[in-house]
Image: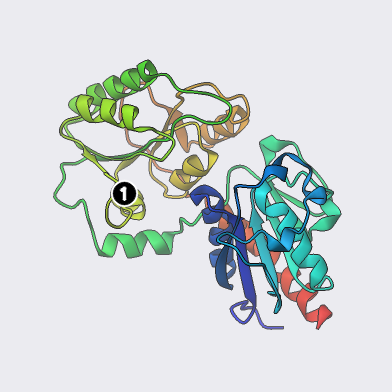
Amino acid sequence: MPDKLSHLTCWCLSANHAGMTNQAVGLAEALELTYEVHHTRQDIWWKFLPPALWPAPLAMKEGGGSFAAPWPDVVISSGRRSVATAMAIRKASGGKTFAIHIQRPGAPLRNFDLVIVPEHDGLRGENVITTRGSMHRISQKRLTEARATPRFAQMKRPLVAVLVGGATKRAEIPPETFRNFAATLAAAISKSGGSIALTPSRRTGKENVAILREALPNAWIWDGGGENPYFNMLAEADTIIVTGDSASMVSEASATGKPVYIYELYKDSKFQPMFAELQKAGIARPFTGTIENWHYAPADETAGVAEKIRSLLLARLLARK
């Protein structure tokens, strides 16, 4: 049996959401699959229905049109808005498409060959793989490639990469919270004598980005133009500070082997078990305004999940041919 999967075709399926897409793509890359990215429509009134009740799920392609044969060997779906389409693809293929879903599907587990969820979601089953964090695209190979073309080589050390999220469906973040965060960052970087490279997200909001710019006049803050500096920030930084509203960002930072500080813009009970595990493992600490240095083995769970899937995927697909 070959140990490479590059001869298999894969669709990475999600709504047009960077975080969801990156989780599916990260797993496809770790499996060394030949993949294409496909997005489902987001402006659908029936999104509040259970996925099994969504009408015409194969007609949910972003930009119009429908998903159609030839079906891929593998579909990796991520997020709730890709569930109905992934289920329909698996059914239309006669079960030949190996279906992997990332995150809780909100549908019976039997509709997928594998479901991957964080431990804190509490979902369990014979075809469920649990992880401490989220799937992602960060690997030591990718970080090495990013370091080969540095973007922050002229900045003072220690270089602190700051990954900033913002409001979620569970919480709005008041401007005062960002003012406190910015003040804590400014004090910490003043004591360390280093510099900051900061990237906001779409959830941060223009008003809050303005607050960060005003409080951190000497920081490099991405304006959204040009190539995304994310991989270079993680590769070149000495320390990483990440806001605690995104399991994906925390997981990506934890795959670098560098000190990770978590600043919680609000307390999200959903993520507390994950943060506690990372602190227990010596990977992350709460950010309170002090920057220190420590070491740990990179927590690359995406590669670990891929190893669990590899032999199962090959055996199942070869048996179906």
Residue at 75% from the left image edge and 66% from the top image edge? 89
Left or right: where 94 falls relative to 230: right
Residue 158 higher or lower than 95, as above or below:
above
Residue 108 higher or lower than 304, as above or below:
above
Left or right: where 194 falls relative to 114: left
Residue 288 higher or lower than 292, as above or below:
above
- Residue 228 visible in the displayed image: yes
Indicate how the structure is coloured in the image. rainbow
Q: Which residue position is annotated with label 1? A: 233
Residue 148 higher or lower than 127, as above or below:
below
Left or right: where 159 falls relative to 320: left
Residue at 68% from the left image edge and 65% from the top image edge? 75
Query: Residue 41 is drawn in which quadrant?
Result: bottom right
At label 1, counting other C-alpha atoms closer than 10 Å, the crowd grade (few under 14, some 14-19, many 20 or more) is: many
Residue at 75% from the left image edge and 57% from the top image edge? 114
Identify which amino acid the numbered label 1 is placed on. Answer: Met
- State how many labels appear: 1
For the N terminus, the image quarter is: bottom right
| Image x and y of residue 9, in percent | 63, 76
Q: Callout 1: helix, strand or loop?
A: helix
